[in-house]
């Protein structure tokens, strides 16, 4: 647990797009709902909305443009340098659309979170909402998990379950799932900075007890 005299946790957020999850986490920090501060928002793409949102919130921004590097390894090495300038306690992937190298993931093992719009382990990768619809699923949702070397395969922390409605299409389902993203990501970040969640030998723990494979479940 963080002591009362401890400084707020230093959080670096990585984005590739709109940055809506970054914004709700930043707002939770500003309201002291999370004992932390976003010290930087870093994007692999210039001119995305996430950078603009961060600037409007007074958060430092940086761009490490992946198109400027010939290999994934060189990009990751430069991203590491940008991240480490801010000595983060936690790294939050918020719509960061890059597959990270094993060396990168190992460097930040246990202190890097990601959010994925499915009930993992279902539907790793892209097009999750349409895949749920095509399969006739009655439930969809979103998962916050620790980042591991296995894409979307790290230990789950918390899931929000969203019912699939008979008249849903990809857009309506995505919208309702995103609403729940904005609920559970700040919760997971809060738990992390309070020392309530941790990674031990590849498994997620909450208050010292192992979590189920799904993580904790929040039902809409």
Image: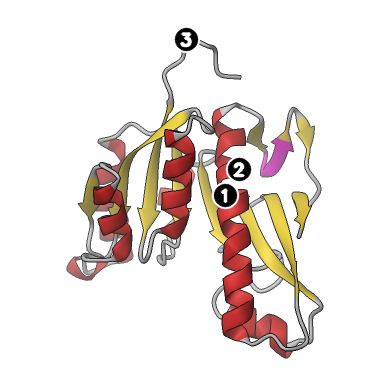
Tell me the residue that label 1 is attached to: 185
Is 32 on the left-hand or right-hand side of 137?
left
Of marks 1 and 3, which one's residue comes earlier in the chain? 3
Tell me the residue that label 3 is attached to: 5
Q: Rounded to the nearest whole Å, what is the CA distance between mark 3 and mark 2?
A: 22 Å
Q: How many marks?
A: 3
Instruction: Identify which residue is drawn at 59% across, 62% down.
Output: 179
Q: Which residues are magenta?
A: 201-205
Callout 3 touching callout 2 (CB < 8 Å): no
**Would you say residue 215 sits in the magenta stretch?**
no
Residue 194 location, quadrant: top right
Residue 169 x/y as whole percent: 64, 87
Is 73 on the left-hand or right-hand side of 103?
left
Circle 1: element type? helix
In this picture, is 143 found above or below 177? above
In this picture, is 20 found above or below 212? below
**Would you say residue 202 sits in the magenta stretch?**
yes
Instruction: Identify which residue is drawn at 45% across, 30% down.
Output: 36
In this picture, is 4 found above or below 81? above
Tell me the residue that label 2 is attached to: 188
Residue 190 location, quadrant: top right
Quadrant of the frame with the C terminus: bottom right
Nearest the camera: 173 or 153?
173
Q: Rounded to the nearest whole Å, what is the CA distance between mark 1 and mark 2?
A: 5 Å
Q: What number is the disc on residue 195?
A: none
Instruction: Identify which residue is drawn at 49% across, 39% down.
Output: 28
Circle 3: element type? loop
Residue 45 location, quadrant: bottom left
Of marks 3 and 2, which one's residue comes earlier in the chain? 3
Nearest the camera: 212 or 220?
220
């Amino acid at each position: 647990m963080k002591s009362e005299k401890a400084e707020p946790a230093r959080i670096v957020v990585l984005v590739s797009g709109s940055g809506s999850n970054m914004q709700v986490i930043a707002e939770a920090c500003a309201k002291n709902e999370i004992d932390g501060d976003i010290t930087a928002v870093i994007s692999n793409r210039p001119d995305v909305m996430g950078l603009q949102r961060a600037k409007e919130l007074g958060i430092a921004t940086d761009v490490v443009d992946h198109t400027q590097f010939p290999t994934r390894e060189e990009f990751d090495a430069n991203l590491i340098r940008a991240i480490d300038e801010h000595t983060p306690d936690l790294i939050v992937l918020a719509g960061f659309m890059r597959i990270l190298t094993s060396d990168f993931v190992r460097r930040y093992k246990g202190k890097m979170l990601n959010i994925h719009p499915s009930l993992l382990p279902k539907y790793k990768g892209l097009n999750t909402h349409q895949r749920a619809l095509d399969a006739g699923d009655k439930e969809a949702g979103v998962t916050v998990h620790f980042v591991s070397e296995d894409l979307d395969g790290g230990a789950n922390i918390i899931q929000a379950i969203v019912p699939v409605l008979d008249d849903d299409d990809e857009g309506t389902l995505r919208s309702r799932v995103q609403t729940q993203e904005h609920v559970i990501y700040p919760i997971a970040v809060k738990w992390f900075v309070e020392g309530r969640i941790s990674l031990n030998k590849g498994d997620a723990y909450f208050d010292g007890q192992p979590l189920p494979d799904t993580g904790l479940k929040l039902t809409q």
